[in-house]
Amino acid sequence: MRAAIATTMSEMEALAGRWAALADQVGARHCAQPFWCTNWWAHLGCGRLHVVTVESDGALLALAPLYRERHLGVDRIRLLGSTFGPVSEMLVMPGQPEAEDLLWATVLDDTRWVADLHGYRDFAGDRRPRRPDDVRHWRAEIVDLCRTIGTTGSVEAYLDDRPASLKRKFRRAERAAQEKGADLEIIVVTDLDGVDRHLEEVGRVFEAGEASNPRLQFLSGEYRPFTLAALRAAAAEQRLALFLLRVGGEPAASAFGYRSGTTLSYSAPRFDPRFGWASPGHQILRAMVEHAFRTELTEIDLLHGDLAYKREWSDGHYDLLRLMFSRSAVLHAVYQAAVRAKAGGFRGLLGRSTSGTPGHGTEGEAADHSGALVERPA
């Protein structure tokens, strides 16, 4: 068993096939898939690649999708895609604890570095983040909650179990559509030709949505080349399901769906406020749910944000963590102080502090999703 670090694009691309298979096997989200990571790095990355791998007899047992950069006077390691707030993780083949230990040890093989992994997907039981025994300087903070939808069984039973408030929204939208004589049409794009055919309409939805509620314009400026490359790469690998709603023939709402393993992630939803009467976001989500059941996916991940509309659809959730650790006590303290100074106070220091078994978090941390400290070794 040996560890290595890919530091060039060609080295990262050479891993793509085995990397994708490992990410699918462990149920990682699309932000940990090579189609997404390589395109993010090619178009938006900065610093130096730091993709750590552990192999044995040619088999890829573990992989950490990371990069290094200089920040606040410190060399730090981050998850690939961090400018977008990814939902990512270390990829470890089940039943390979030695590979996992070697992976984490290699990530911090230099006392001059600090790791700051914001957007790390939390797990239950044995899949909780594990740190090397000799890394004493470690913090883990809950920063968000991600809602999920289970898509096994019957779609009719699932939809019937939705809250009455959601069903009323659909009835109102249907009545309004009939009164206006406007057809509601859903298009699901999964291939390269479809991306090119419908991109202009999706762009119009983004323009209208961003004008009324500015967030991140993925289809213009510096983000456009990355977004187009990611959509096309996902389509080429049969990982894309792009949803477009037309109301009366006009584009009204859209969302990107990226598949990894048997999970479809719900990304970049936007809608034109002129069509708010049609509950466009909910129309998109219903189409996504029906697509997931129809294509034998097992889960939809609604990603960041415990928002009210997501609660109407979800039947599960998990926590999103920020992990900060270093082999150097001084560097760990200096970096945390710099983060606090920049942010005006680190939320984790103000939240509920608990203690537990090193490397396995603590009991009860899921009760607070706005900065609870899930582990704080002395």
Image: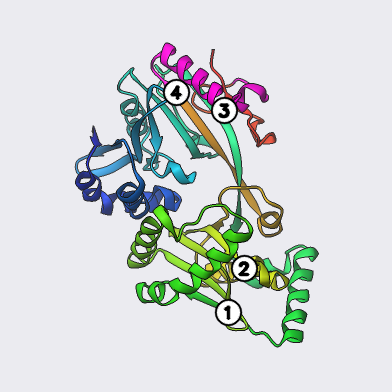
For marks 4 and 3, the one nearer the N-term is 4
Q: Which residue is mark 2?
A: 272
SS class, disc 4: strand
What is the span of residues highlighted in magenta in the rendered image?
326-355
Marks 2 and 3, how far apart in space? Answer: 33 Å
- The prevailing secondary structure element of the residues shown in magenta is helix
Marks 4 and 1, how far apart in space? Answer: 50 Å
Marks 2 and 4, how far apart in space? Answer: 43 Å
Amino acid beneath label 4: Phe
For marks 4 and 1, the one nearer the N-term is 1
Q: Does 316 sit above or below residue 77?
A: below
Label 1 crowd bin: few (<14), some (14–19), many (20+), radius 10 Å: some
Amino acid beneath label 3: Ala
Question: Are the two marked residues, 1 and 2, in contact with CB atoms closer than 8 angstroms?
Answer: yes
Front residue (pair 297, 243) = 243
Label 3 crowd bin: few (<14), some (14–19), many (20+), radius 10 Å: few
For marks 2 and 4, the one nearer the N-term is 2
Figure quadrant of residue 162:
bottom right
For marks 2 and 3, the one nearer the N-term is 2
Residue 250, which numbered label? 1
Question: Residue 268 magenta-drawn?
Answer: no
Q: Which residue is mark 4?
A: 325
For marks 3 and 1, the one nearer the N-term is 1
Marks 4 and 3, how far apart in space? Answer: 18 Å
Q: Residue at x 61, y 43 (%)?
A: 145
Figure quadrant of residue 378:
top right
User: Is residue 138 visible to us here?
Assistant: yes
Residue 343, which numbered label? 3
Front residue (pair 276, 328) = 276
